[in-house]
Image (cartoon, rainbow, N blue to C red):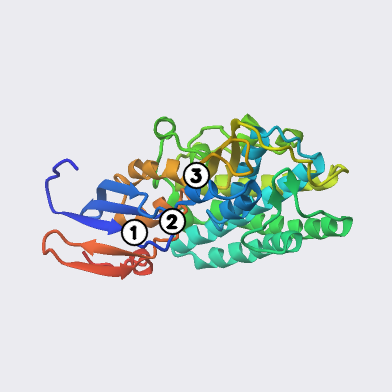
Amino acid sequence: MEKIEGKVCSIPVGPYHPALEEIAFYKVYVDGERIVDALIKPGFNHRGIEKLAMQRSYRRNVQLFERVCGICSDAHTTAYCVAVENCLRIDVPKRAQYIRVIEHEANRIHSHLLWFGVAMHAIGFDTLFMHSWATREAIMDVVETLTGNRVNYSVNTIGGVRRNITPELAKYIEEKLKIVEKGTLYLIKAVKEDKTIKARTSEVGVLTKEEARKYCVVGPTARASGIEEDIRKDDPYINFEDFDFEVCVEDTCDVYGRIMVRLRETLESIKIIRQALKNMPEGKLIADLPYPFPSEDIGRAEAPRGELIYYVKSNYTNIPERIKLRTPTFVNLPATKPMLLGNRLADAPQIIISIDPCLTCNDRLVVVDLRSGRERTVLLQDFIRRRVKL
């Protein structure tokens, strides 16, 4: 950090906790109430998932990668299965692909509504937090009925899916989609009309289009900065080329734009699911699998947080020789530094949350006063509610 004149305090955000995934450490430097610099250190928790995957069969790895993230577990299994299917030249039945699309978009809806509730809670708007999570329950009912689970769906498998959609289930899904659509429209209206939300999110955490390209951000974070990129359109997988939907882009480049992108995408996901139900083809649910042979390929998926990539290298055995994955959070994290600079300390929580980081570890922080040398650990809730005295 460059030397800054005046009284500067450093506030480390993010505990060192080995039990939580994708942990990151933020040290925020403030001059008064303004953030003047930030240091970000990800990668304190290495779980050895890639090494473990190279000791298990292709099928068993589906359950492993489903546990990389509990919120977007379907995106991980989709990207992994696509990578293996590309690598081994497996032609997946179209019906299975459409069921994957439904599962994929239901996962996106649940993730976006969960995130919106957390974002509203961070700015103290618990009413919309409750509305968002109540709406989310309808899509969770769909997921639970379709898969039998609420977190790790266990539907995707190499070459297809393990669950079918009956006409009765399709009708049930449509009824639940009406509830989600109505609730999402209410949330969009509230965000657009409420002055408090705009005051806390507009022109806060700005990431310009040029900065977004420089930091190579992905997903809603990129689209909120005016970049029209979506893997479902740019490099279609699981037959997304069959569906008509809009890539949601905002040009405000701030927290408000990231909120609107995710809420609009929720409506687009509803549209995609309805198309999949209406045009569901007949056919098998799983393809015949070949014997493995030496090859390598990648699988890309548009996870709720952005582009997710899996690399698979095969050999003559049923155990992969090499697997590598890159999550969207790892790409988006560095971009939070320019978002933070110049903003108030009180805005730091919603700025960090606005990229929807997979950082379930952020439950407390340490406040350090450089003038007195005092340190104390406080709950993140107290930080959000401005109970921290420097």
Instruction: Write the residue at 54% across / 41% down.
Output: 308
Which three-letter amino acid code belongs to the residue tagged 2?
Answer: Leu
Give the camera-side residue of 331 and 57: 57
Instruction: Write the residue at 27% across / 69% down.
Output: 377
Q: Position of residue 90 (x, y in %)?
A: 73, 35
Q: CA distance from mark 3 to mark 2?
A: 12 Å
Task: Identify the residue under disc 1.
Answer: 14
Instruction: Write the residue at 53% across / 53% down.
Output: 68
Circle 1 — which element?
loop
Mark sitting earlier along the chain (3/1)? 1
Tag 1: Cα neighbours inside 10 Å, few (<14), some, or many (≥20)? Answer: many
Q: Residue furthest front?
A: 316
Q: As displayed, is residue 24 above or below residue 249?
A: below
Q: Quadrant of the C terminus?
A: bottom left
Task: Identify the residue under disc 3.
Answer: 327
Task: Identify the residue under disc 2.
Answer: 359
Instruction: Write the residue at 64% across / 36% down.
Output: 232
Give the camera-side residue of 289 and 182: 289
